[in-house]
Image (spheres, rainbow, N blue to C red):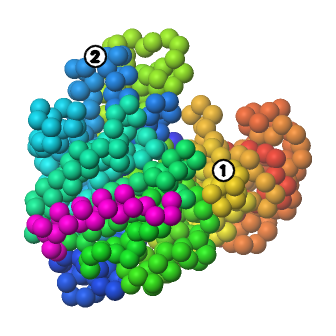
Amino acid sequence: MFKKINIHTLSLCCTLILFFSSTSRLKAQGFLKAEGTKIVNEKGENVLLRGIGLGGWMLQEGYMLKVNKEGQQYRIKERLEELVGQRKTQEFYEAWLANHTRKVDIDSMKAWGFNSVRLPMHYNLYTLPIEKESVKGQNTWLEKGFAMTDALLAWCKANKMYLILDLHAAPGGQGNDLNISDRDPSKPSLWDSPENQQKTIALWKKLADRYANEPWIGGYDILNEPNWGFEDPKNDKNGTKEKVNAPLKKLMTEITKAIRAVDQKHMVIIEGNGWGNNYNGILPQWDDNMVLSYHKYWNYNTQESIAHMLKARKEFNIPVWLGETGENSNVWFTEAIRLLETNNIGWAWWPLKKIGSNNPMEIKSNANYNQVVNYLNQGGDKPKEADAHQGLMELAAAARLENTILHRDVIDAMIRQPFSVQTKPFKKHDVGQHTLIHAVDYDLGRNGIAYFDTDTADYHVSTGKGTPGNRGRVYRNDGVDIFKDGDQFYVGHIEAGEWLQYTVNVLKKGTYTIKLKIAAAESTGQVSILVNGQVVSKAQAIPTTGGEQNFQFLEVKGIVFNQGKQTLKILADIGGFNFSQIQLVKE
């Protein structure tokens, strides 16, 4: 179903979708700054940041690689060394860093309609851990991280996109959610070690000094998602209930002071405790060019859901930026972005690419790497060294943009759909003598307009229970439940009232037989067919096919199509069946 796309094809796609958003293009260059409750450029024009974070590049979180056991990067690396040795593990990581993010990725983001990039930095690419410094308190600087940042900045500048530096993994680790900051709990944390704090401050001063005169650096996100219980570490280990947050404010104040010693121009972006949401004791701000960042996942996209940030913005006269969000369905993405932009809040999605479909690019796994993942997660038979190494190198190659699966539906949901009720064809469907349409290739657009599904997104933070949205989590990221059986994708978990719309181009007026390829364990379902909004076949009974994956054709004859563009809608009057294909045969 998926086809590998080359760079020339992707460039064409990028050109075609430039129209998605003209408003995201920055009208003026110059340093961004906080002016009252707005982020503005040097002309004083409001700038609404639309960006994506490069999660998984400098810092791999286990889930991005399908490693759900001991998912800190340092542990993944140690365990890979046990499989393939230190040299081959290093070879994999070098290839990963070289392939994951390149100029073509930033060029593509610009073409799609984004205007900013958030770089999640791992400190160990810039400086040694305190345990490896030959002199206590010394800071040995490593060229690798700075060179990577310089290259990324050059790509952003070429596209007139702002780059926001984000310290995602601070020396020692800033939280008890270990994977996020690659924290080793056997060593002193950021909060337990004055040496780690001083190294963090020194790193920010070094970065600020290097980029002080770079206007396409949008700002310094000085500490990602601190989650630490200062007052009650036993019962509140992630700091969600902290009332004072004194150590966090002290460190952020000291980082700001070090930055201002060498850089007076760039915005300083602060995040609260409890994964960037607990600001008790931290405000008011201590700098006149500061932005308040928060993170939002898996809750409702209502005005009430952001009321606390709007209140803080007004009370402290400070801009608000949603520095990280995502990991949900397209429905949630569209809802969230419409809510944010209506309230003049810029955003950075998470992440650009990983193994998984709810991001613009999906990194494809491979059979040998799957064996590695199974071993790391479950134990059992150890993969052969040669197979494990091959799987790792194939995965590193798969991270290159031209080898990923491009999810146009995700990009469309983020850039076009928040403020458009129009649908667009997902694929071109020219109807001739005998035409095949895959069920999963329904139109692009919002739920209720291009399709309708009753369970569309994950709101478990608001509901307190699982709401899976897309249950299959393959091929597309809408609310539609898409599954894979062998090489076949199909729509499943179909409930009463759900429907899919397809824009078709009929080459010649005539009467057609429509064949729906369906599977049903029980003969309880019913389906109707609509053309241009009019029912042409009502409540056809779905026969039992002998199993949920045993697909057979249900034929409906005598459907008249005019020549030209039409809409074809398949409506489940009663659910309980799976659906994989539409065939249109001219009678």
Residue 542 x, y percent position in the rendering = 85, 47
Q: Secondary structure at mark 2?
A: loop
Tell me which residue sits at (81%, 40%) in the image. 520
Magenta-tinted stretch:
242-265
Q: CA distance from mark 1 to mark 2?
A: 39 Å
Q: Are marks 1 and 2 in contact (CB under 8 Å)?
A: no
Q: Main secondary structure of the magenta part?
A: helix
Which is closer to the viewer, label 1 or label 2? 2
118 left or right of 539 in image: left
Q: Residue placed at 39% from the left, 61% from the top?
A: 246
Mark 1 lies on residue:
468
Residue, far front: 231
Compared with residue 245, is residue 91 higher up or lower down, i.e. above or below? above
Which amino acid is tagged 2? Gly
Q: Which mark is residue 457?
A: none
Q: Is residue 283 left or right of residue 444?
A: left
Answer few, some or many: residues within 10 Å of disc 2's Cα (few below 14, many 20 plus, some between 14 and 19): some
Image coords of residue 168 (percent x, y):
33, 51
Q: What SS does tag 1 mark?
A: loop
